[in-house]
Image: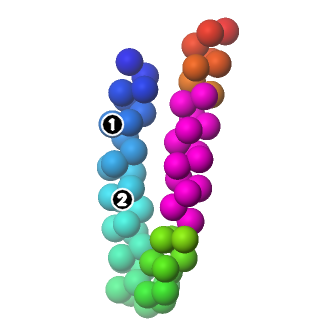
Amino acid sequence: MRIRRLSGIVLPLLIVAAGIVLLLNTTGVLSWSAWAELGRLWPVAVILFGLSLVWQRFRDRG
């Protein structure tokens, strides 16, 4: 049940993060090259998601 709740929040968080980056790009706070940097770091999101699943499994056992 908790995995569904976690997976249900991942997409909205990604959309909010993309919106924040777009807002910062539009206002000139970030350059458009920030997208290239974020594109290079996508494996970090996969690793964090996997770690959160492992953490939940261990927490539910104890």
Which quadrant of the structure image shows residue 53?
A: top right
Identify which amino acid the numbered label 2 is placed on. Val
- Residue receiving disc 1: 8
Q: Residues within 10 Å of mark 2 (few under 14, many from 20)?
A: few
Answer with mark 2 or mark 1, whichever residue precedes in sequence: 1
Separation (CA) of disc 2 from disc 1:
14 Å
Q: Secondary structure at mark 1?
A: helix
Identify which amino acid the numbered label 1 is placed on. Gly
Q: Which mark is residue 16?
A: 2
Identify the residue shown where x is 48% and y is 71%: 39
Please provide the residue range marked out in magenta. 41-54
Q: Residues within 10 Å of mark 1 (few under 14, many from 20)?
A: few
Q: Is residue 25 above or below residue 58?
A: below
Question: Does residue 23 appear in this view?
Answer: yes
Identify the residue shown where x is 62% and y is 28%: 55
Q: Nearer the viewer, residue 26 or 53?
A: 53
| Quadrant, the N terminus | top left
Q: Nearer the viewer, residue 35 or 17?
A: 35
Q: Is residue 20 above or below residue 25?
A: above
